[in-house]
């Protein structure tokens, strides 16, 4: 059997250390507790020895899929009657991500020391959102912990799916656009200069498109470093700009104004906001906390301001639907349904239904956007390459006629 090194505190408060043999970590933990001691630290004693030399290993924190998988596993284990401490320990043993393993080990220690699970999660706000923590906290007060974890896991899975669809819709035109630019640069830098010798001394007879491309080719081959520096400065300036309040507002407005993408982003923000709000309302989270969390995860400055206005209005005793009626960011039909949910006392159910509708709408919009982008990008790429080819071929025909 493997050996485990432990550090424990006895009833008198004295720290004891030692090594014990056990079948697994859980059995070793049970042995130490059977003595009436509180575990401070417990780890395998037969772990791999440290190697000399430099260690370049890097451990990244858990991603969204890791958090979703953890939540789903924890829900199943709690439903099966396993204690939360043992469940976290079991998941930690199976985790290969070193940083996530350390996080889970610390959570287990916090739970063992008497803290609520939501307090243990609060140590890691970077990975566990306020929505996650508040829903867990609400279930700790009202019961139904495993069902709440299952609901959180479903919510996270939907958010991951939505994000993947939006990124997928954006990646396709980016790839086609990159290919178009790469082809254009290749033709201007490597192909067109080979034809310059043919056109030497005959510049006056060349058509305007050819003159333009020749000038462009000379500039790109002779001053490529200026173009490279300008591109880096432009990207750097854009990143710095969107980090400012003005720049972020401008960028978020642009996303809701671009003809081909505005419907997609609008559906995404509405679905995300209402789905989050519905989950929190159904979990029993106080309405002001619900609206504040919804504002923070909205993903768009304009929608964040809208929910902040709702927060201020509700704080004054008004209904949620009252400030929404004045906002152009939500369709009137959605506001009416929110108002109906408030009147009937079924706000959470109404929000879930509306969010589900916009989730389906988002999927439909993404499919249509992708279908429209494909021919547009092909036409654009073909047009650019065709323009360059014709600019090269036309003067050759014209010069051959002059020679005749």
Image: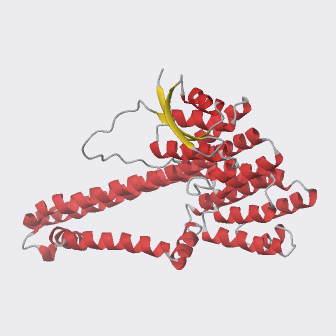
Residue 299 placement, left or right of 321: left
Would you say residue 273 is visible in this rendering? Answer: yes
Question: Splitting the image into 4 quarters, where does residue 179 fall?
Answer: bottom left
Residue at 38% over, 57% down: 177
Would you say residue 353 is visible in this rendering? Answer: no
Give the image location of residue 54, x and y in percent: 26, 47
Q: Nearer the viewer, residue 396 or 101?
A: 101
Question: Splitting the image into 4 quarters, where does residue 319 fall?
Answer: bottom right
Q: Nearer the viewer, residue 347 or 110?
A: 110
Q: Nearer the viewer, residue 379 or 118?
A: 118
Residue 66 placement, left or right of 194: right
Give the image location of residue 130, x and y in percent: 66, 58
**Residue 330 drawn above or below residue 137:** below
Q: Nearer the viewer, residue 389 or 268?
A: 268
Residue 147 placement, left or right of 268: right
Residue at 44% over, 49% down: 60
Residue at 53% over, 24% down: 22
Callout count: 0
Residue at 37% over, 71% down: 236
């Amino acid at each position: 059997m493997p050996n485990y090194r432990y550090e424990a505190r006895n009833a008198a408060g004295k720290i004891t250390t030692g090594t014990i043999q056990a079948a697994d970590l859980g059995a070793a933990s049970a042995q130490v507790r059977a003595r009436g001691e509180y575990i401070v630290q417990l780890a395998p004693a037969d772990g791999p020895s440290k190697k000399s030399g430099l260690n370049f290993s890097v451990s990244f924190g858990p991603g969204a899929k890791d958090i979703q998988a953890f939540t789903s596993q924890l829900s199943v284990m709690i439903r099966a009657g396993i204690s939360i401490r043992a469940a976290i320990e079991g998941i930690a043993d199976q985790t290969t991500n070193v940083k996530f393993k350390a996080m889970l080990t610390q959570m287990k220690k916090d739970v063992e020391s008497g803290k609520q699970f939501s307090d243990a999660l609060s140590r890691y706000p970077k990975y566990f959102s306020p929505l996650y923590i508040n829903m867990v906290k609400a279930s700790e007060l009202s019961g139904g912990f495993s069902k709440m974890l299952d609901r959180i896991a479903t919510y996270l899975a939907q958010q991951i799916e939505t994000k993947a669809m939006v990124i997928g819709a954006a990646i396709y035109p980016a790839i086609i656009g990159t290919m178009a630019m790469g082809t254009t640069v290749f033709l201007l830098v490597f192909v067109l200069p080979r034809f310059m010798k043919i056109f030497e001394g005959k510049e006056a007879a060349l058509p305007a498109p050819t003159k333009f491309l020749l000038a462009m080719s000379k500039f790109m081959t002779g001053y490529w470093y200026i173009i490279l520096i300008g591109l880096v400065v432009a990207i750097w300036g854009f990143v710095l700009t969107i980090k400012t309040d003005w720049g972020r507002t401008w960028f978020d407005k642009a996303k809701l104004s671009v003809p081909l993408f505005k419907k997609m982003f609008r559906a995404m923000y509405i679905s995300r906001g209402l789905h989050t709000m519905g989950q929190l309302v159904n979990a029993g989270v106080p309405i002001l906390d619900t609206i504040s969390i919804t504002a923070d995860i909205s993903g768009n400055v304009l929608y964040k301001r809208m929910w902040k206005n709702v927060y201020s209005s509700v704080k004054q005793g008004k209904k949620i639907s009252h400030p929404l009626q004045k906002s152009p960011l939500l369709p009137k039909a959605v506001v009416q349904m929110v108002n109906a949910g408030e009147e009937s006392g079924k706000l959470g159910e109404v929000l879930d239904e509306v969010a589900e509708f916009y989730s389906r709408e988002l999927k439909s919009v993404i499919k249509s956007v992708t279908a429209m982008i494909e021919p547009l990008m092909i036409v654009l790429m073909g047009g650019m390459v065709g323009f360059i080819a014709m600019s090269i071929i036309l003067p050759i025909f014209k010069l051959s006629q002059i020679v005749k």
